[in-house]
Amino acid sequence: MKIISVFNQKGGVGKTTTVVNLSAALGRKKKKVLVIDLDPQGNTTSGLGVEKDNVENTIYDVLVNDVNVVDSIVDTSSNNVKLIPSNNDLSGFEIEAVSREQRESLLSSAIVDLEGYDFVLIDCPPSLGLLSINALVASNSVIIPIQSEYYALEGVSQLVQTIDLVKRSLNKDLEVEGVVISMFDGRNNLSLEVVEEVKKYFKDKVYKSIIPRNIRLAEAPSYGMSVVDYDEKSKGAIAYLNLAKELIKQNR
Ligand SMILES: Nc1ncnc2c1ncn2[C@@H]1O[C@H](COP(=O)(O)OP(=O)(O)OP(=O)(O)O)[C@@H](O)[C@H]1O
Ligand SMILES: [Mg+2]
C-alpha cells in the first residue's frame, strides 16, 4: 500500500483535480484506491460525487472524535475508488489539535491498520499548517502539482523545506514521488519556458505526462464525476490515464 500526499501550499494549482482524476485513472487500471480529502473545502469529496454535507462521518470525526477510520469510508462515482470525505467541519481542526499530544501524527495513527488498497491519495489544503503536516507524516511520498504559469516556482523552496523538515523530524522515509505540471497550454511560449524551469529544478522527478489546460477537466466536478468517467476521450482524461501508468510503473 503506497500512501501519497498531493501537496503544494499554493492555492489553485491543481491538487484536487489531480487527486480526483489520478485516483479514477488508477481505478480504471484495476488498482484499489482510497482517497482522503484533507481539505475543509471538500472539493475532492464533491468532485467524486459525494454530498459533503450529507455524510455520516468525515475525516474530522476520524481525527478529532476518534471514529474508526473504516466507518468513515464511502463509495464514489468512480470504480475502485473509495473516499474518506471532508467538509467545513475540518476547518476547526488546526485549533482543536493544538491541545492534543502527537498532533502531527493523528492521521498517521488513524490509518495505521488500514489495508486492502494499492494506493492511498491524500488531498492537502493550500497551506503549510497542521493538516498538511499530518498528511506528510502519514505518507510514503509526495506528488507536487505545479501550475504552468509565470510564478510557477514561487513558494517551491518553502514547500521543499517543509518536506525536508518532516523528513528530518517525523517521517524519515518521506520522498518526493514526482512533480506533475498542470494546466499546460502548448500555444503559449511561457508554458514551455515554465516546463524547462521546473525540469531544471526537479530534474528527473518531473512526470512525462503533462496535464493540459482542458475544459472537460474544469467541467467534470460539477457533475460529481472524474474526467475519466465524464469524458474518457478528452485530452484531460488521456493525460491522467498516462500519469497513472507512470505512477504504476514507478511502483512496480
Ligand atoms: N488542467 C486543467 N484544465 C482546466 N482547468 C483546470 C485544470 N486543473 C485544474 N483546473 C481548474 O482550476 C481550478 C483549481 O484547480 P484545483 O481545485 O484542482 O486546485 P487546488 O490546488 O486543489 O486548489 P486549492 O488550493 O484551492 O485546493 C479548478 O476550478 C479546476 O477545475
Ligand atoms: Mg484543492
Image (tube, helix red, strand yellow):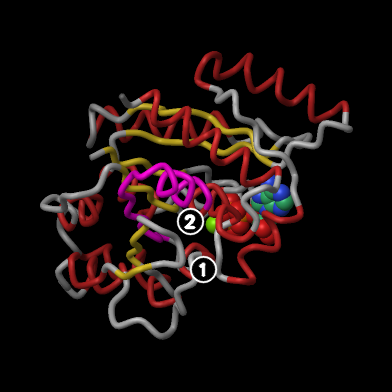
- Circle 2 Cα neighbour tier, 10 Å, few/some/many (<14 / 14–19 / ≥20): many
Res 68 → quadrant: bottom left
In the depicted view, which residue is nearer to us: 203 or 20? Answer: 20
In the depicted view, which residue is nearer to us: 74 or 109? Answer: 74
Res 155 → quadrant: top right
Against 226, residue 45 (above or below) is below
In the depicted view, which residue is nearer to us: 165 or 35? Answer: 35
Which residue is the extreme one toward the bottom? 54
Magenta highlight on residue 34: yes
The mark that comes first in sequence, 1 or 2, is 1
Q: Helix or strand or loop: what does disc 1 sit on? A: loop
Mark 2: is the Cβ under 8 angstroms from ligand 1?
Answer: yes
Q: Residue 70 at what x, y percent from top left?
A: 18, 66
Mark 1: is the Cβ under 8 angstroms from ligand 1?
Answer: yes
Q: Amino acid at mark 2?
A: Pro
In the depicted view, which residue is nearer to us: 91 or 141? Answer: 141
Quadrant for the N terminus, please: top left
Q: Where residue 41 is drawn, which disc sits there?
A: 1
Q: Residue 239 at what x, y percent from top left?
A: 62, 38
Residue beneath the point at 71% across and 18% down: 196
Magenta highlight on residue 150: no
Residue beneath the point at 59% across and 46% down: 10
Against 209, residue 56 (above or below) is below
Residue beneath the point at 24% across and 55% down: 107
Quadrant for the C terminus, please: top left
Disc 1 and disc 2 in contact, CB within 8 angstroms: yes
Q: Where residue 74 is drawn, which disc sits there?
A: none
Q: Which residues are magenta?
A: 21-38
Q: Residue at label 2?
A: 125
> Where does ligand 1 appear, by image quarter?
bottom right
